[in-house]
Amino acid sequence: MSATVSTRQSGGVSVVDVGGKITLGEGSIAVRDTVRSQVEAGNKKIILNLGNVTYIDSSGIGELVSAYTTVSNSGGTLKLLNLTKRVHDLLQITKLYTVFEVFDDEAAAVASF
């Protein structure tokens, strides 16, 4: 099963709910296309909710960095929400945990903008 991606609005912030596997191929493309469409629509405040991600590989981690860069270059902010233990550990190992603002509570994440 590849990634499932859906988008909703919460307090003027775009919340992108990601589930399944973010891996080389369809999973990464789904995340990339969704983030790009949000930026193109003028949404500068984006939260990636990764609470239902079951697996992520190096390509998926690269996609998170790419999404962060895309949003930042457009003058926006990307934050992460509900990291699973695996995603959290991978971000720690790759030292990317210091790059992203990470939240466990959606209300706090939305309020942080």
Image: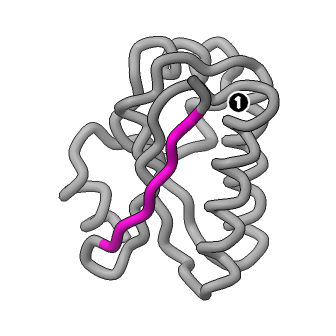
Residue 110 drawn at (x, y percent): 29, 64
Q: Give the residue pinned by disc 1.
A: 60
Q: Residue furthest front?
A: 1
Residue 69 drawn at (x, y percent): 76, 57
Task: Please state which of residues 71 and 50 is positioned toward the viewer in this rendering.
Answer: 50
Residue at (62, 21) in percent of width and height: 56
Q: What stretch is highlighted in magenta?
A: 3-9
Q: In which quarter of the image is the N terminus?
A: top right
- In the depicted structure, whether residue 95 falls above or below residue 42: above
Q: What secondary structure is marked by label 1?
A: helix
- In the depicted structure, whether residue 65 falls above or below residue 11: above
Type of colouring:
one colour
Residue 18 drawn at (x, y percent): 47, 42
Residue at (40, 21) in percent of width and height: 84
Q: What residue type is labelled 1?
A: Gly
Q: Residue furthest bottom?
A: 42
Image quadrant assignment for residue 90: top right
Q: In which quarter of the image is the C terminus?
A: bottom left
Task: Please state which of residues 92 and 15 is positioned toward the viewer in this rendering.
Answer: 15
- In the depicted structure, whether residue 4 falls above or below residue 59: below
Residue 10 drawn at (x, y percent): 27, 71
Q: Is residue 61 magenta?
A: no
Image quadrant assignment for residue 55: top right
Residue at (34, 35) in percent of width and height: 82
Q: Locate residue 113 relative to residue 28 in the image: left or right.
A: left
Q: What secondary structure is the stretch in magenta mostly built from?
A: strand
Task: Please state which of residues 20 and 64 is positioned toward the viewer in this rendering.
Answer: 20
Dot 1, crowdedness within 10 Å: few (<14), some or many (≥20)?
A: many
